[in-house]
Amino acid sequence: MTITAIEGFDVLTTTLVAAKYPLGAQFSPTMAAGRFGSGQSYKPDSGNQNGEWSPTIAPAAAATFAFGLAILLPSGTIAGAGTGTRIVGFLDSGGNTQARITVAADGTVRAVSGVSTVMASSAAGVFTPDVFHFLECEFVLSDTVGVFKIWVDGVLVVNVTTGDTKGASATTVFRLQITPSGMGAGNIQLDDYYQTDGARLGESRVVTLMPTSDTADKDWGRSAGSDNYALVDERPSDGDTTYVTSSTVGDLDLYGMEDLSFTPASIYAVQSSIIARKDDAADRAVRCNIKSGGTTANGTALGLAAGYQQRVTIHATDPNTAAAWTASGVNALQAGPETTI
């Protein structure tokens, strides 16, 4: 099992969300407080059912995957749900619906094939209004041996192990469509998303750590002041207000990072992230590297455009030990940008 996507929303503005997720993030979304009171959550626009957040299946459209997501449904959304409103749609590349997860007015969660064929339902009261629940799903697309399992807060509430989960002719799911359907009063909140190519992880939290100090690797120039880390430690990103800059291939800035505020039972992965743009017409690219002990793991290069974009790289293991990350390993790592073109 491989983790293929992680999203905590903490450093993103609505403009950056729209750039990162161009198939969703429509109709004036906003950012709200995070699930545990810090950071940010994503809040689709309340006035249009298409004000969705829509992550693609990574790294490519697939028939088998799993995901987890913290989701808050306001009382108005649940009260108006009737027999069940879509909160997650499974769409092919043409926008056709393969399957759905719906929630009814009494808090019942349902696995739906296509747009209306109910495959299985939970007990009532699984979802309560105005509370963040952690929703997880393992999904296999098939018209004969499909799998559709749903967990809420760690409890398996829907368990389809052999069924017809295929509501359209395509053989894969291309993206998820996460927003209430037909409500006109959504106001849901989303946070702490992960995706894998197979099994669920269990309830998870995305913790965003920001730079706190410079290191000996301090090659990039500054928009102001003398401390590079202080220009890239905003949560969310502040764009052109403060920044570091480089036009020399090989320039490297590495920063000491915040420590975790708690010791997790498990750390499934570390994700490096860079938000960058260029201000000339030359080809430019950068990547965000991490350094653990004496070992550096390079991030994925981001070819720069005139507007800010985010690029991330998932590091499933500590590059210094080739083993699972520990809290001490995360607390000791360094991270920062390198100019590659």
Image: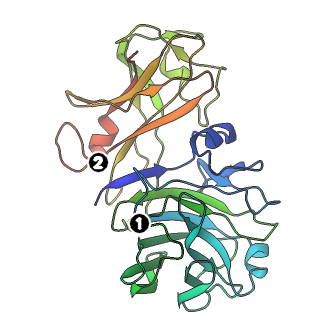
Q: Residue at (47%, 70%) from the top-left corner?
A: 136
Seen from the viewer's position, the closer of residues 140 and 246 is: 140
> Horizontally, is 57 left or right of 296 in the view?
right
Q: Residue at (31%, 29%) from the top-left corner?
A: 298
Is residue 35 visible to us here?
A: no
Q: Residue at (33%, 68%) from the top-left corner?
A: 199
Q: Residue at (37%, 10%) from the top-left corner?
A: 249
Quarter of the rendering occupied by the C terminus: top left
Instruction: Specify few, some or many for label 2: CA neighbours under 10 Å numbering under 14, 14-19, or 20 or more.
Output: some
Q: Amino acid at mark 2?
A: Ala
Quarter of the rendering occupied by the N terminus: bottom left
Asked if 14 appears above or below 94 in the picture, the reply is: above
Instruction: Specify few, some or many for label 1: CA neighbours under 10 Å numbering under 14, 14-19, or 20 or more.
Output: many
Residue 254 lies in quadrant:
top left
Q: Amino acid at mark 1?
A: Ala
Is residue 7 visible to us here?
A: yes
Describe the element under mark 1 as helix, strand or loop: strand
Q: Which residue, given by chain and number where applicable, does mark 2 sit on?
A: 316
Q: Which residue, given by chain and number where applicable, does mark 1 sit on?
A: 66
> Horizontally, is 305 left or right of 139 in the view?
right
Asked if 192 appears above or below 86 in the picture, the reply is: above
Q: Nearer the viewer, mark 2 or mark 1?
A: 1
* Mark drawn on residue 20: none
Seen from the viewer's position, the closer of residues 159 and 235 is: 159
Describe the element under mark 2 as helix, strand or loop: loop
Q: Residue furthest bottom?
A: 123
- Counting from the top left corner in percent of width and height, residue 57 is at 46, 56
- Counting from the top left corner in percent of width and height, residue 124 is at 61, 91
> Horizontally, is 26 left or right of 146 in the view?
right
